[in-house]
Amino acid sequence: MTLGLVAALALAGCVEETAMPGPSDGRSLFMENCAVCHGADGKGDGQMARAMSVAPKNLTLIKVRHGNVFPRAKVMSIIDGYARSDRSASWMPEFGALLEGDLVPYDSGDGKPTPTPRKLVALAEYLESIQAER
């Protein structure tokens, strides 16, 4: 009986580790990395916003700014630094820690799951969850 319990707990641990990250996983990453500029509610009113020459974007309006579609790939490329040549994202710091750790298969909108850092997916999922409705 004890062996069965140990096996069940080990299996539960594996399921948790391989489960896709969701918005709740990304919230803490947002608070640690983004809230200082974008504010705790994502509306661009963080502590550092007043000191910045370019006001942080209101992250609750990403979907509205893109025709009521959340552009996952674009959002992740801005966060991870791929879109640094985009002048609107040039003030964003690099978040190398979001690229560390395990990878999960994530469909960023093209129908093809691609190995993507778990933390980056979690943050994108959180940002998608805080989008304002039209």
Image: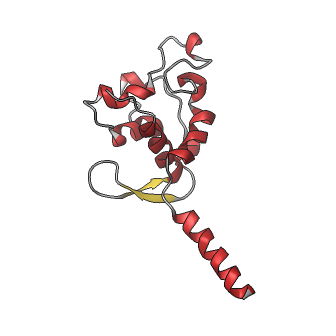
Relative image position of residue 93 (x, y in whole percent): 53, 29
Can residue 81 be spotted in the picture? no
Which residue is painted at 47% across and 40% down in the image? 80
Which residue is painted at 45% across and 34% down in the image? 130
Q: How many marks?
A: 0
Relative image position of residue 112 (x, y in whole percent): 29, 57
Can you tell which quarter of the image residue 90 is in?
top left
Which residue is painted at 44% across and 22% down in the image? 58
Q: Nearer the viewer, residue 1 or 76?
A: 1
In this picture, is 51 found above or below 127? above
Q: Nearer the viewer, residue 103 or 43?
A: 43
Query: How does the figure colour the protein chain or chains?
Result: secondary structure
Is 114 situated left or right of 36 in this image? Answer: left
Can you tell which quarter of the image residue 8 is in?
bottom right
Which residue is painted at 54% across and 17% down in the image? 45
Q: Which of the image's four quarters has the C terminus? A: top left
In this picture, is 78 found above or below 22? above
Can residue 130 be spotted in the picture? yes
Q: Which of the image's four quarters has the N terminus? A: bottom right
Relative image position of residue 25 (x, y in whole percent): 56, 48
Q: Residue furthest right?
A: 2
